[in-house]
Image: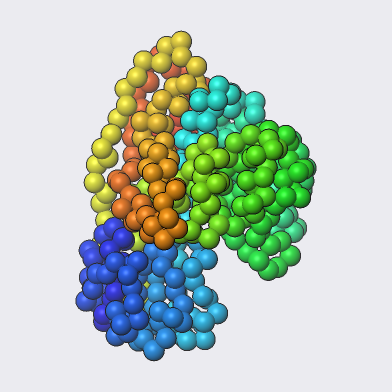
Amino acid sequence: MKIVCDTNLPLGRTLFSTLGQVTLADGSRLTPELVRDADMLMVRDVPLNKALLEGSSVRFIGTAVTGTDHVDADWLAEAGIRWVHAPRANGESVADYCIAALLEYAHTRHHRLDGATVALIGVGWIGGMIRRRCEALGMRVLCCDPPRKDNPRDVEAQNFLPQDVVLAQADYIIPFVPLTKEGPHPTWHMLNAETLKGAKYGAVLINMARGAVCDTEALIAALRDGQLSDAIIDVWEGEPDFSPELADLAFLATPHLAGHSYEGKVNGTIAVYHAACAYLGKQPAVQPILPPPVIPKITMDVQNRPDEEVLWFITQKLSMVVADHLNFLDIVHLPEAQRRRRFAIQRRTYPYRRQFCATTLYLQHASPTLLAKAAAIGFRLPDGNAVTP
């Protein structure tokens, strides 16, 4: 059993060597020759298509990420290649990144999140986490999810609102939908010139879902004319290409890093490892143990400090969103070929970031309300119980 494993899968050699002979390869440099005699292929978001796999002996692929835009599912089915992904692996990582970005925005722009309104478009696994965390911060969350509402057995979704209704009221617009071009509710360019005109004037757009959910040119126009006051962009139409103009206009711009916590990557590796074990009819032989975090605890006297200021301070000690933004700005105005290459490099060489749940907070003089907020956005409290929405 030969298994080609992307070097960007943490613990990849440790896990997959229990199933066969592992050959490590840089996923960004995979060629048909490298995978031709492999039985299994384990990657992150490498394009999986006829160009790479035709004529190979690969019969099982694990792609250790949430999205599937890079997978030619129809061709793989025709070729008889089984594939799996990891749809819930990095959800908490994305939720951490989104909340850290929100708190950074509110702190810098001198806004209060408490009492602000969010239009949450897409209330699935990640969207649900974002909803609970925003509500814990005192935000009013208006939910829109047409596919869920179409299901009469989804009782909760029957109270969700149409997109135009939530956009008209929202201070913050947060889509968390997969990218689809077909079906009754396509999401490609879901936020376009027409829909953005119906948004509340001066709203802030946060896109950590898929770049093409937003029409890039319409988004740029909305930012230039003030229809949108700001944007926080982690995903880009045409990745690894991206719009330098949009990056310049955004309050925060990062190269698709929200899900790149260490836990998020490890969870993805574990998910596809378990799926590979099931495919081969074997029991998982390894239970990974994560290393201790760089910042295992934060001790802070919070007396007379506003809750949002405390949470901003704590999240910025752990989140890398501002540093990621500054690093990204270094490549924005390079020639196109270099931009594309550096975009991929920044993703593949991303530094070690742990999720909020790896850190225990010791907040002296904290109110029960502040402790509840800290727990709701993922932190551990001194009793040792992690509360992860």
The image quadrant that residue 337 belongs to is bottom left
Measuring 44% from the left and 22% from the top, which residue is drawn there? 310
Q: Decide: is 143 above or below 379.
A: below
Colour scheme in use = rainbow
Task: Estimate the x, y position of residue 73 in percent, counting from the top left.
Answer: 52, 76
**Residue 169 appears in the rendering:** yes
Measuring 29% from the left and 66% from the top, which residue is drawn there? 26
Measuring 53% from the left and 60% from the top, which residue is drawn there? 238
Residues 90 and 157: in front is 90
Task: Estimate the x, y position of residue 10 in percent, counting from the top left.
Answer: 29, 58
The image quadrant that residue 172 belongs to is top right
Residues 108 and 75: in front is 108
Residue lying furthest top: 304
- In the drawing, does residue 73 fall left or right of residue 63? right
- In the drawing, does residue 64 fall left or right of residue 111? left
Task: Estimate the x, y position of residue 375 in percent, counting from the top left.
Answer: 45, 32
Q: Quadrant of the N terminus?
A: bottom left
Task: Estimate the x, y position of residue 226 in percent, counting from the top left.
Answer: 68, 35
- In the drawing, does residue 76 fall left or right of residue 158? left
Q: Decide: is 56 above or below 343.
A: below
